[in-house]
Amino acid sequence: MKGESLNDRASRAKARWLKRVMYASKATSVQKCFAYIIFDHLNCVTLDCWPAQPRVARLLGCKSNKTVQRAARGLAKLGLITLKPNHAGKSEYRYAPVFLPEDEDNSVGKNGRSCLQKVDTNVRESFLDIHSISSSTQEAGERRKIPLRPRPSFNPRERGAIELKVAEKVGRDGMDILARLAKIDDAIVARLCRAFAEGLLGERDLAAARLAAEQA
């Protein structure tokens, strides 16, 4: 996936995810409409979204937030999304699609399914003081979203130095923005650092990072 930004990768993954929800799942019509809202609001850096329930209710054309809650729980029960409390208090949950490897990958193997490269196993070294529980430490049995495929050019041991450069690109209060993102999930900061190391961190990615930090 040479030359693709985080936004490019997320756009492909979410389109394939939505197609699977629409055509290959047992989701109800309301749940499918909710899936489209998640698709439409997805942040390409955090790989989730956090629209307030009253807004979702308006978009769904319903009067009660309970309809929103039932639709969200239904998608989660089908293994299509994960729900995470939004501690910012501006909405009740963060909604994340459950991506499959083939949602993100361009190449397809002989068996019709794509293969992910091995994730870096080096110990990460970050300049940020705050590390949240990352996606790899969620509760056992919970289906997790598949992270964007790493490239060998990123060395986690150099992450601290890369964070400083990413913070500079993010703009004013860059380190504070990264710290806020790390509170949500440390994997978000790692994703930004990896994209920067690969020379693929675009303006849309930076804007998405700023937006996510504002809502954290």
Image (cartoon, grey):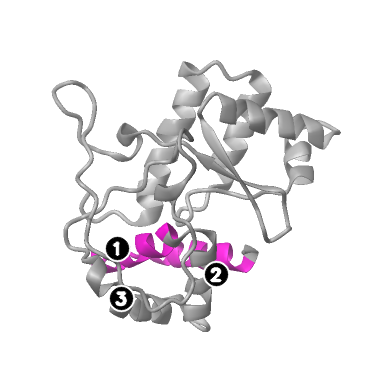
Q: According to the image, label 2 marks what residue?
A: 180
Q: According to the image, label 1 marks what residue?
A: 194
Up-down relation of residue 105 to residue 210 (above or below) = above
* Amino acid type, label 2: Arg
Magenta-highlighted stretch: main secondary structure? helix
Q: Earlier in the sequence, mark 3 or mark 2?
A: 3
Q: How many marks?
A: 3
* Amino acid type, label 3: Ile
- As measured in the structure, the alpha-carbon distance from the residue carrying label 1 to the one carrying label 3 is 9 Å
* Amino acid type, label 1: Arg
Q: According to the image, label 3 marks what residue?
A: 162
Up-down relation of residue 14 to residue 128 (above or below) = above
Q: Could you classify mark 3 by the number of other residues whose Cα lies within 10 Å: few (under 14), some (14-19), or many (20 or more)?
A: many
In this rendered view, identify the residue nearer to me: 167 or 86.
Answer: 86
46 horizontally vs 158: left or right: right
Up-down relation of residue 187 to residue 70 (above or below) = below
142 horizontally vs 166: left or right: right
Q: Quadrant of the C terminus?
A: bottom right
Q: Quadrant of residue 140?
A: top left
